[in-house]
Amino acid sequence: MAVLLGDLEWMDQPLVAETSDPEWEEEVISVFGGVPGCLRRTAAVPWLRRAYFDLSRTPTPSLSLAEFELAGFVTAQENACRYCYGVARTRMRMLGFTEEMVERIERSAQLAEADPEERELVRFCRNLARSKPRPSREARKTLESVGYSPRQTVELAWVTAAASFCNRVSTLLAMPPEYAMERDTPKRNLWDKLKSWLPRGAPPVPDPPVYPAPTATGILGELVGVLEGTPAAAVLEGTVQACFNTSALPRRTICLVFAVISHTLGSSLCAKAAAEALDAEGFPRPALDDVLRTLGSRELDNVERRLLPWARDTVWLPEQPKRIQEKTLPLTSLGDRTLLEAVGVAALANSCVRLAMLLE
Amino acid sequence: MTGVLVVLAVAGALGVAVLGARQRKNLREMERHKEALGRTLARLEHIERAFQRFAPLEVVEKFAQGEAAHEPEYRDVTVMFADLQGFTPLSERIEPRVMVDMLNGYFRAMNRALAEHHGHLSRMMGDGLMALFGAFDHNPWQAADAVRAALSMRSALEEYNRTLAERGLPKLAFGIGINQGRAVAGVMGSDKLMEFTVIGDAVNLAARVEGLTRTLGVEILVTEAVRHALDHRFLVRRMPATAVKGKVEPVVTFAVDSFDENSTAS
């Protein structure tokens, strides 16, 4: 069960510095109207900052804005990400959810009182984010039994996986919360309450990210395929390719992180993809077997030896985020760039493995 | 006529005032109930969180939502037994208050080492404990985690013994036995006392192996199943096969000496 915002223990010091990149900031401002801290602190790694930016604004046409925000909100709370939870909570309030409604959602004890659609949406997203164990086919059927279409189920899984990516990046880097934004949470006076009865237009939606049409080939192509017909397919394919092809980390290190995270969560689809990619890199199969059996191998280099046991700890984030931040702290000795790359790869692997529940 | 209107106006004003007062009272009452509900929910959540130390999250949530009891199931688990050696005669020589204090400090130190390596303290039995790895969450590295936890517990005990010595108290010594295997995991007990635990041959063997630490004169002893999950970074010694109660064949065990993160030994 998830912890409430005020009870989360969060490291005071972020683990990486901000990077100034005027061109990047201009692009972000053109979409969001400002540059959130998360996009400044990830700016040194092009694929990572792009992934954070795009995954958080991928359109989900089959879901209402409220469903989209709700899924992101409960995922952030379940992942105990102080940064994203604070932002998501503020967005819910901006969207018109009252404080009472928000509290009812974040307190699992009150979930039984919610209507079936809301209750099952919250359960599905929480269980998928938590993945202890990953939700089964049965969970998808339950969601569909209360009226969600298969497309909506796929998009809910996508929102949870995408939010989980941002949650992990923000948590592992101890991103300073957006206190200024949180302070601006609307206080509803009588006029606001009356105004909420009047018809109004939908709030502005950020421009969607632009990617080439997905091919569902290449590493994790099957996963892209399951998103076919949704804007998320192209974003996922573009993000995975950018991670594997442009990361400063060696490709085999990325594959090893994917392999460890897939193995921890028991995803045969992602584990197979990682193993095949490692074969292509010439990493010996017996060495991979060693890694999956013991988290160690003589074939590993010094960075991999440090990253793999840590990657395994990113799968189930502890109730108090400070614990995983303290485990990440020693990796700062690898330098900002390597730490950012490692955090991004671990976060993406975690999201892909969660998404793979749609096929497993 | 004017008099009637005045009376009606006064009566109306009074009526409005009375209704307003009643409304305010109802609102205050509702506010109080809401606050009480909020406090109750917070307490319920606190209890649910506390129970996560005793059972997997899904089990706690099922109980909290009043759903049927968790279905028992087979799980691959690693079971550790740790027992203080020579503590019973020792406890007869020291004051009960000091003895309890010594034990509490010991359990605190052991629990920290267990939690650091993904273990759960499942049960305390006098001066002994049972810990589980992989029973609460799927854990492919449970055996190595258990052995690293045992090594951390050994360091923690050394540290704890130093603080005991500073207080003029005797040193503690323990034996740890670890086995991995399939066990039935579930909520067991009576309606008065229940716990989430594991039962089966794998559990019994872990307890027997812990008993062997006295016979073989070692601190940390693991079975062949656990040894199989360890790599070159663990320094282990094969011990002579020894007969244990409940097993037809003598059991092969390995003493664990150390773990070296950077070992390249073959």
Image (cartoon, coloured by chain):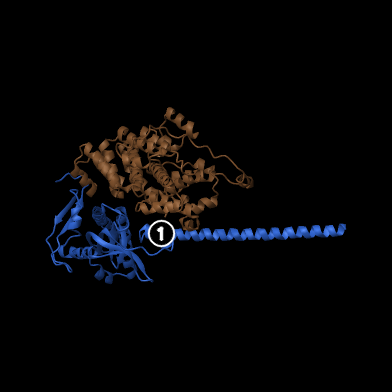
Q: Residue at x 38, y 71 (%)?
A: B191
- Residue B26 drawn above or below residue B94: above
Q: Position of residue A218 (x, y in %)?
A: 29, 36
Q: Is residue B168 visible?
A: no
Q: Position of residue A230 (x, y in %)?
A: 41, 39
Compare residues B171 and B211 and report the one nearer the observer: B211
Q: Which residue is mark 1?
A: B61
Q: Where does the N terminus of chain B fall, quadrant-wise?
A: bottom right
Residue A263 vs residue A183: left or right?
left
Q: Residues within 10 Å of mark 1 (few under 14, many from 20)?
A: many
Compare residues A322 and A101 and report the one nearer the observer: A101
Q: Chain of mark 1?
A: B
Residue B68 vs residue A281: left or right?
right
Q: Residue at x 53, y 44 (%)?
A: A95
Compare residues B80 and A332 and report the one nearer the observer: B80
Q: Position of residue A221 (x, y in %)?
A: 31, 39
Q: Position of residue A53 (x, y in %)?
A: 42, 36
Q: Is residue A127 visible?
A: yes
- Residue A300 drawn above or below residue B88: above
Residue A290 vs residue A29: left or right?
left
Q: Could you tell me which secondary element the residue under label 1 belongs to? A: helix
- State which quadrant residue B183 falls in: bottom left
Q: Residue at x 27, y 40 (%)?
A: A255
Task: Indicate the colour of chain A.
Answer: brown
- What amino acid is labelled 1 in the image? Glu
Residue B90 vs residue B191: left or right?
left
Task: Indicate the colour of chain B.
Answer: blue
Compare residues A261 and A225 and report the one nearer the observer: A225
